Amino acid sequence: MSDGAGPASYGRVDEDGTVYVRTQAGERSVGQVPDVPPEEALTFFTRRFEALELEVSLLEKRIASGALSPDDAVSSIRTVRTAVTDAHAVGDLDGLAARLEALVPKVAEQRAARKAQKAEATAQAKQAKERYVVEAEKLAAGNDWRGGVNRFRELLDEWKALPRLDRATDDELWHRFSSARTTYTRRRKSQFAKESEQRESARATKEKLVTEAEALQNSTDWGPTTSEYRDLMTRWKAAGSAPRGVDDELWKRFRGAQDVFFGAKSAAMSEQDSEFKANGVAKQALVEEAETILPVRDLAEARAAYRTVLERWAEIGKVPREMIRPLDSRLRAVESAIKGFEDDQWRRTNPEARARAEETASKLEAQIATLEEKAAKAESRGDAKAARDATASAETYREWLAQARKAADDFSG
């Protein structure tokens, strides 16, 4: 009610019970209620107005909330407007009509907003579908046979959830997506068929390898058999995978044969290690005995003692790998010391070496005499510098002479 008055202020009742409503178009009859008080007759028609007013209010709320589509809203406004225009009711009908007219531009705004939203949603859907197509074509060209099929399923579900585009664009994108999915499915089936064939080939190869492994499991030829098992393992890895259940069973047999052989080998090696350790202790004692030969004083005795050590050494047998080099080094050191003593003794008794040493000493003595004579002559003529130089040179030659005489004396030892 635009003026704040109640519905009854927009009507009146005639003496015969006819009820009228006043609008901007004038006064018109809305009905007759005879034989009742005027207030009761008027109340009957104001209640009809209140029902119309409630209907307009509900329509306003539904349009404001967006519960109605623009088309449904326009249709509802038209229907309610007709009901208000032709209403047999008393109240501010012009006010209700004005409220209905005020809804028209709101609906127009909502229509424009929905159109913009639809355009945005369509653009986003187009971008999404183009993205899905690119990803699908990439998957179709790749080899992700496990994850790819799940991703295609996800892409398809997401595609179905998107709104349709214009028919030409939608059909073109769907054709690319569908073609990519078909290509991927065909390649995946082909790959799985190939893998199945390879697995069957691997089954035959591994069954043969298992037979070979089981034939070797009781061998005691540790070295060559270990090499054969190493070769079998290389061939096993190169064979590829057999069908899953079969592959596990074949591996169990293959590994079992290896365990039998290597378990026996380990036990044998353990026994051998004990023997080698005992040998190591014996050779350690023998090396210490050999080292008592040093320092060498008598060559014949040293040779005899060392020969006895070598004979006992050969009888002992192998030692742990980590002991070989240290023990051999210490034994060779004793041998080298004996050889060094022998070489030194021979050098001391070598007549040719003694003759060379004595010859060197004689030459040095002659050179010293020459330098001393040169120094005396320089001094007699007053050449002090030449005398000093000759004397200094003579001193140097005397030092060399001392060394040469010592060497000659060594050969007499």
Image: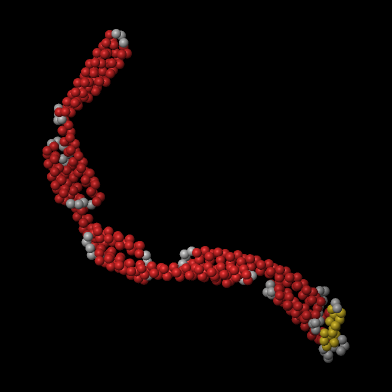
Q: Residue at x 30, y 66 (%)?
A: 209
User: Whole-percent x and y of residue 221?
Assistant: 22, 60
Horizontal placement of 392 versus 79: left or right? left
Nearer-the-camera pick, 168 or 49: 168
Q: How is the image coloured?
A: secondary structure
Tell me if I can see residue 61 in this picture: no
Q: Is residue 85 visible?
A: yes
Which residue occupies 17% across, 25% down?
355
Q: Quadrant of residue 387?
A: top left
Which residue corresponds to the image point at 23% horizontal and 49% vertical from the top-left?
A: 323
Q: Quadrant of residue 2?
A: bottom right
Q: Name the residue furthest bottom.
A: 35
Q: Name, please, the residue furthest toward the top.
A: 381
Pinpoint residue 95: horizontal percent, then vertical percent: 80, 75
**Which residue sits at x=61%, y=66%?**
126
Say which of 369 and 327 sits in front.
369
Q: Is residue 305 above or below residue 219?
A: above
Residue 391: x %, y % from top left? 27, 16
Dividing the image into 4 quarters, which one contains the C terminus? Answer: top left
Residue 252 in the image, given as x and y percentages of width and height: 32, 68
Count of marks overlaid on the render: 0
Q: Is residue 406 above or below residue 61?
A: above
Quadrant in the rendering for residue 217: bottom left
Quarter of the image with the N terminus is bottom right
Nearest to the observer: residue 62 or residue 375: 375
